[in-house]
Image (tube, coloured by chain):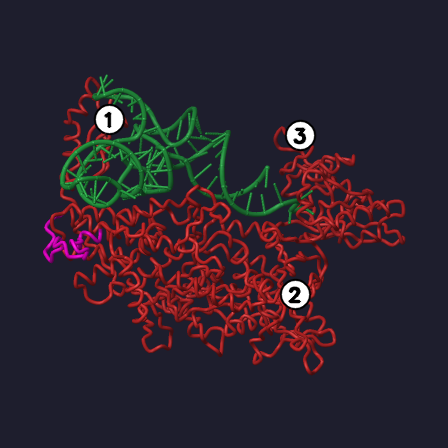
Amino acid sequence: MSDRRKPFPFDDFEPKWQAVWEENSTFRTPNPGDADFDGTKPKFYVLDMFPYPSGNGLHVGHPEGYTATDIIGRAKRRQGHNVLHPMGWDSFGLPAEQYAIKTGQHPAITTAANIATFKRQLKSLGFAYDWSREIATTDPGYVRWTQWIFLQLYSSYFDEETQKARPVAELEAKGWTREQIDEVRLAFVHEAPVNWSPDLGTVLANEEVEEWKSKGHIVERRPLRQWMLRITKYAQRLIDELEPLDWPEGIKLLQKNWIGRSEGAEVEFTVAAVSNRQAKVTVFTTRPDTLFGATYMVLAPEHELVSEITTAEQKAAVEAYISACATKSDMERGDLNKDKSGVFTGAFATNPVNGEQIPVWIADYVMMGYGTGAIMAVPAHDERDFEFAKKFDLPILQVVQPTNDSNWQGYTDPGIAVNSGFLDGLPTLEAKAKMIDWLESNGKGKRRIQYKLRDWLFSRQRYWGEPFPLTWKDGYHYAVPDAELPLLAPPLDDYKPSGSPEPLLSKAREWVELPDGSIRETNTMPQWAGSCWYYLRYCDPSNSNRFISKEAESYWSGSSVKVSSVQCSVEEDSKTENLKLNTENSPTGMVDLYVGGTEHAVLHLLYARFWHKVLHDLGHVTTKEPFQKLVNQGLILGEDGQKMSKSRGNVVNPDVVVKEFGADALRLYEMFMGPLEQVKPWQMKGVEGVSRFLARVWRIAFEQDEAGEWKSTGKVQDVPCTDKELLRVVHETIKKVTEDIAKLSFNTAISQMMVCTNAFTQAEVVPLKEFTLLLDVLNPFAPHLSEEIHARLGGSGLLSEKPWPNYDEAALILDEIEVVVQVNGKLRDKIRVANGAAQADVEALALASTKVQEHTDGKTVRKVIYVPGKLVSIVAN
RNA sequence: GCCGGAGUGGCGAAAUUGGUAGACGCGCCUGACUUAGGAUCAGGAGCCGCAAGGUGUGCAGGUUCGAGUCCUGUCUCCGGCACCA
């Protein structure tokens, strides 16, 4: 392939146009306050999930989403929008640090080199990013504000009444003590069993454990003091405020399930403790209606009351069981799904509703992290309790009558209460309500909503992350003053983890120990911190006074536009009220379109929403949600239909594709493969196909002479288009491409441009005006090629800056149309009629068709259905 | 197990409110130009059949003049969650 002739000289003009765009700052987006800012234009904020700049460089999955957003951004810009389409780097992260451990080289050096590679590769694809807004989460100017936002969380609490974050200063003013305030901060210290990885030298969030385990790292449970973020306070809002967002329903559901809301009740049981005291054990249940059927109780092995209630006879067995569980991770506990294990504590609890004495067991199928870490077991109507009861021969008592003929044993669906005293005869839903009322009025329990979502474990013991801007003195923590931010980590001689949970930064004694005797917090933030708010920083990337200016925030949120549109439409007072309410509750995502992979469906997208809501509550941002519309691009598989991976050897390097076929061909192929959201395999032959298409467009205008120079074909001429059919195809193409871009249906837009190109190829003469219209709509897809042809044909200015064309409605109308004729539902003939022909004429023509008559012969025509311009359906028998 | 998504040619895929199934591209076949063709251009093709014709959107039913599209049941594949009480 060394000297293979290029089908068109992309290797020559692609770098050329990239340089032209860069020199002219073609894609620079002015901000409010800039001299060239035009506030009358609507804003459009289109965002890519920024990459982690790994040492491997770009893979073909990256340009899939990036090309999609680039096409939309380029089209929107030409349609008169101020388009914000930025790019940056999620540049903290473990690989750079792992490399530092091996080589002793500071991670910043590796990171900078990787960013340079990514940037070169992205630029080679001609993306219309505003590179003046480039950010990296590792930049000191960025870290500063990540730390500032953390301090906002640290100095806030969640006000239950308004369901909003408020500054803790308000509590101080009310006379709260330091200890009380530390209990409610959104960022707080907590000692809890965490996922500790000795070989990574850090703890991990629950959500991250799987990922690192699959990479062969060890993760174990151990109790440690850690910084947590109180995301659970936002559980309900994170569910409710998801509703109006324009996200795929599947992703919304994934988040809802992750948050995992359940309605139920807590019920208090009394347990006789060894010391003859009465211990209270609270359980959470979603089925308070089955309380009469609770035949035993189970505590999590880690439950605080276990040692207190265990009898002397059972002590040894209980302790053995607990220590066996401690060595098991959550995962292993889950793996043993089917095989239940547990030990009797020797204690008995009193069922509050009927005074029955029920045995108290401990078992690892009850987890400490959810609900109260204790359950009432109703084996008749819960699968897990049922299995456990069978295994340990515990009583199974029916309290729900199935509504169908299923066996009541293990029946978990709603039914009718039986053997349940005052609940007897009530359907499950009503029985639940009645039982909760009874519990509340008797002081034995209360209504409760429980979420699966846990608070976010926010500290890491790594080096390559944002240090917490906090100091400690006399057992209290203090915020580092804003003026001292960013607080950067000092370089270390040695980045190796110690194997103990002591953070790496504690090695830097001089940095840790402050003159006044206080010491620095040595934990660092997880990689998520930087990606939680980067979309805000793009709006005002170099502001050194605020994380985002009020003006930039307001403009890029679309707030200014919304206010004026409301004012225009207000007429009556009552309406004003409604409109205000609607504005308050209206979809309020800041980013108009966010494109990225599904792997971030819960983590990044949940964390970013949480931070955004805190910033919103504190008055720093006007929108409630960060991302209005979300689209997940589908994974690109290798040519073998398998996930791309080095070990399989099926990875496609975009650099190779660009070298051989050009950036436009790569862009076009990625969009032509199929729907954006779909998982689809790579086919190099397909790249060749779209490359051929681009070459056909090129060859309409140019051909190669003997010397290999590209010369005009003379086919494109500045003459009026006399071919009505050709004109129709061109305008159809403008219409379809415009609509398809808006629908993100890029593959069909491309196929229409292929149809149009084929029509031009077959034409004797190609009118310049119409050919330029094709280039116009091809431009966002293949910006280099379209720009080059446009320039060579004498077009003025940059095509990338030209207003988007409109199609001519009149050109779409056909003189004659084809109408399909069906007899008894089967296609029998096609007839050509004048466009707009009267129904009676078309029907008569259809009935007169010989092919139709062959099938109606000897039958009576019962009915004739006419779909204007489409078909005639004849019913005959 | 639970929750999502998807099943259409040899392959990637198209198909307004139900209205010509397979657009567009890959691969394949034929022809033209050519020393050559892995370039380009013109044409062909779902499947069965020489043809007329029949048949066809995972499978089985249903509604309808008409179903890839709507309804009922069922199978398979992919993704996520997974003892959440």
Give me the disc on residue A853: none
For mark 3, what is the residue? A407
Would residue B38 appear left or right of A522 to someone viewing this image?
Answer: left
Q: Earlier in the sequence, mark 3 or mark 2?
A: 2
Relative to residue A415, is residue A281 depicted above or below? below
Asked which quadrant contains residue A124, the reply is bottom left
Q: Secondary structure at mark 2?
A: strand
Q: Outermost residue toward the top? A: A858
Residue A578 is at least partly visible in this image: no
Q: Which chain is red?
A: A
Q: Which chain is green?
A: B
- Rendering coords of residue A313 (x, y %): 89, 45
Range of residues picked out in magenta: A697-724
For mark 1, what is the residue? A823
Whether marks 3 and 2 lie on the same chain: yes
Q: Quick one: label 1, few (<14), some, or many (20+) residues within 10 Å?
A: many
- Rendering coords of residue A138 (x, y %): 52, 69
Q: Earlier in the sequence, mark 1 or mark 3?
A: 3
Q: Quick one: label 2, few (<14), some, or many (20+) residues within 10 Å?
A: many
Could you say which is closer to the camera, residue A688 or residue A850? A688
Label 1, label 3: how many angstroms apart (C-alpha)?
54 Å
Asked which quadrant contains residue A579, the reply is bottom left
Q: Chain of mark 3?
A: A
Give me the disc on residue A227: 2
Q: Give the residue type at disc 2.
A: Trp
Find out whether the residues at labels 1 and 3 contact each other: C-beta distance under 8 Å: no
Could you say which is closer to the camera, residue A251 or residue A758? A758
Q: Chain of mark 1?
A: A
Is residue A461 magenta-colored?
Answer: no
- Rendering coords of residue A51 (x, y %): 47, 60
